[in-house]
Amino acid sequence: MALLPIAPVIIPFLTAVAMILAWRRRDVQRPLSIISGITSFLVALQLFFTVRQDGIQILEMGSWPAPFGIVFVVDLLSAIMVLVTAVMGLLVAIYALADINAEMEALGYHPLYFLLLAGVSGSFLTGDLFNLYVWFEIMLITSFVLLVMQGTLAQLEGAVKYVTISLVSSALFLSALGLMYGLVGTLNMADVAQKMDVVARTEPVMVTAVSLLFLVAFGIKSALFPLFGWLPAAYHTPPTAVTTIFGALLTKVGVYAILRLFTLIFVQNMAVIQPVLLTFAAMTMVSGVFGAIVQYDFRRLLSFHIISQIGYLIMGIGIMTVTSLAGTVFFLVHVIFAKSALFLVSGVVYSLQGSYDLKQLGGLYKKSVPLSLLFFIPAMALAGIPPLSGFWAKFALVMGGLFAGQHLIVAIALFVSVWTLYSMIKIWTHVYWRTRPEEHDAPLRILPRQEAWFRIAPAAILGLITLLMGLMAGPVFDLAIDTAVQLLDRQAYITAVLGQ
């Protein structure tokens, strides 16, 4: 139990090491990926219930007390995100058994995948800003290799944009760390939060500058306007399993970092930061959804919606009330599951009809009603149709905005929801409802039973989760409220880590 806070990092890391030792042994790596995924899920579930029952959990590496040693901190937000990561890690690992070819497996797909999961979990659990930078770099390296593994021209072009912008983000992040250390002499988050209250009174301009530098660095990683150009250029190019895990987790780590810093550390200058956050949120929502509605590539359209949904998350952070932060937490979990389900469905459609181009697809509703429901439920959840999860998440954000008097951002959020629904209907019309164009018409590929299970079961589970989150919105929102209250209680975090 003492090592429970670090177990979500250790398990995928050791799995990656074991897979490297079993290099090119597909017969070992494939079952090991599922075993590791199940183990990570059970450990993350145990960690969540421990935090829920006993409060914030701390692990000081090497018994060095904070702020001098490396510390892992698990509050409700971290526990939720680690659990969501474990769920996605397991389901995408199952999907990958049908989606990732032998060539990619031979090049090291499986160990890279689990190193990526270790980096994501480490980012959610670390209590130190420099270690957050380290975990970000692990994610960058592994995601870059996964992105270019097939070596196609489109992948290489997208990867160049992705890694170039990501390196700029890393440079800004590192610069912000240097300035932060110069201001307070520490990078432990709890210690920084405690000392920042004093520094903000003597160096308010410098604190604001550092906070904005962090915001730009994390804004690039989370694909905020106007820093999102790398995402639609890259995310639609790799296999569906890779696209799905990228879309589910990578940008959300950036959002998590913004949420953590602006509820724990940079709380003194919110009068300056709030309009900046809300402006970024509005422009991100609008540019993302307008980028989506003109697309005809299934995955590229969904990639633009990742950007749009990030705007909703930043909206909740910018409003900075209990209700809006609870809406952000609810929306964060909802959008990971709903969007991932849609990406997995796009892969199923591709495996059946051989294209991601909406203009070349059609007729799937008549061929398979269950397959149509796999798309319809998460699509309507993403659009915010009641009683699905997206409706309640957006409802919380809208109510938080109205209570705070932020009517403009609420109007923009509702406007974007209409266009989100339009783009989901566009996919439904082209892929499912209309007859497939004659020049592209061909019999559906018959999936072998095992491949069908590997592809359809993860998408069905994610769709079911979005449905249950909507039908059980009360308990889920209660958890989100508790998480928001804990986020706004800075002293509880500081006391748990520093004991003072």
Image (cartoon, rainbow, N blue to C red):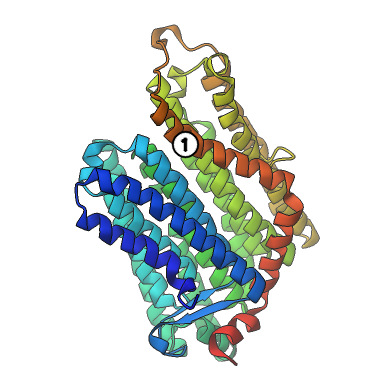
Q: Which quadrant would residue 330 be assigned to in this image?
A: bottom right
Residue located at (43% from left, 35% from top) = 454
Residue located at (36% from left, 44% from top) = 234
What is the x, y in percent for residue 138? 33, 63
Observer-nearest of 415 and 80: 80
Crowding at mark 1 (Cα within 10 Å: few <14, some 14-19, many 20+): many
What is the x, y in percent for residue 380? 65, 35
Q: Is residue 160 visible?
A: no
Q: Is residue 113 visible?
A: yes
Q: Residue furthest right?
A: 403
Return the residue at label 1: 344
Above or below: residue 379 compared with residue 186 = above
Above or below: residue 245 compared with residue 276 = above
Using residue 36 as the reference point, say whether residue 202 is left or right of it: right
What is the x, y in percent for residue 41? 49, 56
Quarter of the image where the C terminus is located: bottom right
Using residue 164 as the reference point, say whether residue 286 is left or right of it: right
Residue located at (77% from left, 63% from top) = 404
Using residue 343 as the reference point, say whether residue 145 is left or right of it: left
